[in-house]
Image (cartoon, rainbow, N blue to C red):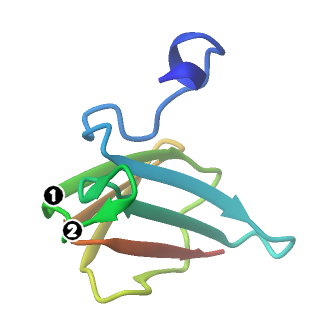
Amino acid sequence: DVLVNLCGAVSIAPELTEMVEVSLSGNPSGDTLVQLVNNSGTFGVSFVKPLPVDSITLVIPAEAAPSEVYTLNGGKVSRQFHDGTLTLTLDRLEEYDAIMLRR
């Protein structure tokens, strides 16, 4: 919220609940890792199973379509690339998942 509203950052998941943390990281080879953490089960110092989040859509600016897209924790992801925009849809997020975008 602070990055988007005060610093002018563009959200890649504007419709996603604030209880899910999304981060992007890249490597020198041009691969990108999108990590999603479901914090809905965190209450102070206690933790319970988080509420699942269905049909998460991420919109990422990209120069080209990735050669391969897959999740690291068993989720199913679909992709579309059009005019410099990669749209990813993750079927369901439980506690954590990550999406690897191979260059």
Identify the residue at horizontal 21%, vertical 68% (top origin): 48
Q: Residues within 10 Å of mark 1 (few under 14, many from 20)?
A: some
Residue at 19% of width from left, 71% of height from top?
49
**The C terminus lies in quadrant:** bottom right
Residue 84 falls in which quadrant of the image? Answer: top right
User: How far across and how far down the image is residue 25, in percent?
Assistant: 68, 61
Q: Which mark is residue 78?
A: none
* Vertical comparison of 11 with 43: above or below: above
Helix, strand or loop at label 1? It is strand
84 left or right, relative to 97: right
Q: Which residue is mark 2?
A: 48
Q: Quadrant of residue 71?
A: bottom left
| Residue 31 or residue 22, whichever sits in front | 22
Residue ID at (40%, 62%): 37
**Residue farthest along the top direction in this orientation:** 6
Alpha-carbon neighbours of circle 2 within 10 Å: few (<14), some, or many (≥20)? Answer: few
Judging depth in this view, the residue of 88 and 33 nearest the camera is 33
The alpha-carbon separation of the residues under discs 1 and 2 comes to 22 Å
- Residue drawn where x is 44% and y is 86% of the image: 72
Q: Residue furthest right?
A: 28
Depth check, mark 1 against mark 2: the one in front is 2
